Image (cartoon, rainbow, N blue to C red):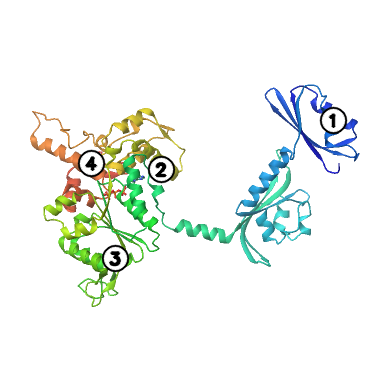
Amino acid sequence: MNRTSKLNLQFVDRIGIVADISRHVARLSVNIVSMEVQRKQELADVYLEVDPSRREISARDVLETLSSLDGLQSIRLIETMPHENRQNTFRTVLDNVSDGIVSIDAGGNITTINRLARTIYNCLECNPIGKRIDQTPVMDDTLLSCLEGKTVSRLRHSVATDKGRFQFFISARPIVDASGRITGAVKIMKDMREIEALVEKAAQAERISFETIVGDSPTVNEAIAFARKIAPTAAIVSIRGQSGTGKELFARAIHFESGRSGPFVAVNCAAIPDALLESELFGYESGSFTGASKSGHTGLFEQAKGGTLFLDEIADLPPGPQAKILRAIQEKRIRRIGGRSEIEIDARIVTATNRHLEQLVADGAFRQDLYYRINVLPVHLPPLQARREDIPVLADHFLFQINCRLGTRLQRLTRKAQDKLARHDWPGNVRELKNVIERAAILCDAADIGAESILFSFELSGHAPDERRPAVKAHGNAPLSRQLDALERRIVIDALNSSKSIRQAASGLGISHTALRNKIKKHGLQASPTGYAVKANP
Ligand SMILES: Nc1ncnc2c1ncn2[C@@H]1O[C@H](COP(=O)(O)OP(=O)(O)OP(=O)(O)O)[C@@H](O)[C@H]1O
């Protein structure tokens, strides 16, 4: 036998097992290379590696000698010792991290060097483990200086190798034992290219795919499956659903999955003043009207070249832009304001609306031909009320998101808080749920969020929930004007808290932006991180 033998012996745990094994092995004139004992409840697992010095002794001889030991339950030959398994795991982990790692002991001998560090120092073939660091290509003074207690942070360094120049940041520190004694030093090298790639990735806008969309309900899953199917085509998509149901989220996911390399350009048709709509959408040439920029302006259709143009709130377009958009869609060309030539457009159109398009067509407020053009592939997003099973998953998702964003500990909703969420009608849909959860996480410091931290906007304003119900009780002795004021205040607060902007809330209420601003002033409302509410002392 010219290589070590490894055995695993299992005993009923008792005192003196190691001494007994050592004695039996010594009788065979065999050296113990390593022995490891692991206690498992009533049992002792012993791992033994021996190196027989007498060649005629086989692994089986060792096994037979030890078989008579007191309390032995089982004995078998094994291929690897537990410490070898741990070392292999450790080496695999080290070799797969994206940083170069080198460590030395107190004598300056290399104890660890991972694959990336060996590549950097051009010693993939040689084995520098156990050698003095200053006698290997890994030589650098940083690690040796750490043996004197020095610490190095993000030092820029470069090494020329036959594979080119490696540039990296070095951090190094002493390894200290429990008594404070320096027993070695470790160095970590971060590849500059890796850092540059990370910076580039972090700088990119968040990519929203269908995986980003949360929901367990069959209706949402059907909408995702349908949108996923049509995403790679060039077809116009129309996303229909109440405000806050996730129309823009779907539009972004469709863009992402379409594989189009151009940008996602979103425009809220209800938010742009009518006078600016055409110049925003189609652009203008220099000096084409008073106040126009000298250098002209690239419209959103052009900006979305190679990407997606998301026309949000398309039903709110006035007739002029409706006609121009229809033409742009049909001819795939636009003309800038004041421009002589036509420009070819290459933007995939996704539209969205929370309005009843068919009714608007019947009322003559939306062009029928544009309706047919955009409504080829409608994606319907149901209101949250109609998919109540999504409420807990969405709530958990938003809670996790806000905890991560605020860097706070992970919280959870108590049963009573979940029940309160389940009972609400959610007129502002998923956006309202997101706001309620964020508000709760900001207001509640505890790990468990209780029902008292779940506050709907009507609770903040001190008024009853839903304008569809007779929420304001008629008081025979209160003047009608005061009762109407209270009702109006509640409706305004609800609209503001379930909309993205004042302009959107105004559009939902069917009043102008200025009229809504006046009402905010009249009722003494103010925005806060938890939503709109009456000012403490109006
Ligand atoms: N299924 C979902 N999973 C995760 N987040 C969602 C989901 N649906 C909506 N949200 C989130 O809710 C908020 C509102 O969604 P979004 O802006 O897409 O709604 P919308 O229908 O476009 O609203 P509006 O009509 O008012 O413009 C966003 O923060 C969005 O990320």
> Label 3 near label 1: C-beta < 8 Å?
no
Label 2, label 4: how many angstroms apart (C-alpha)? Answer: 23 Å
Query: Mark 3 or mark 4, which has the lower sequence index?
Result: 3
Query: Horizontal placement of 256 versus 10: left or right?
Result: left
How many numbered discs sit on the rendered protein?
A: 4
Query: Mark 2 or mark 4, which has the lower sequence index?
Result: 2
- Identify the residue shown where x is 19% and y is 41%: 491
Residue 508 visible in image: yes
Q: Secondary structure at mark 2?
A: helix
Numbered circle sitting on residue 406: none
Numbered circle sitting on residue 301: 3
Q: Quickly name the residue at label 4.
A: 494
Q: Quickly name the residue at label 1.
A: 22
- Identify the residue shown where x is 20% and y is 55%: 315
Q: Quickly name the residue at label 2.
A: 402
Label 2, label 1: how many angstroms apart (C-alpha)? Answer: 59 Å
Q: Nearer the viewer, residue 439 or 346?
A: 346
Residue 279 visible in image: no
Query: Closer to us: mark 3 or mark 4?
Result: 3
Query: Horizontal placement of 435 versus 91: left or right?
Result: left
> Given the image, on which type of amino acid does mark 4 rest?
Asp
Query: Mark 2 or mark 1, which has the lower sequence index?
Result: 1
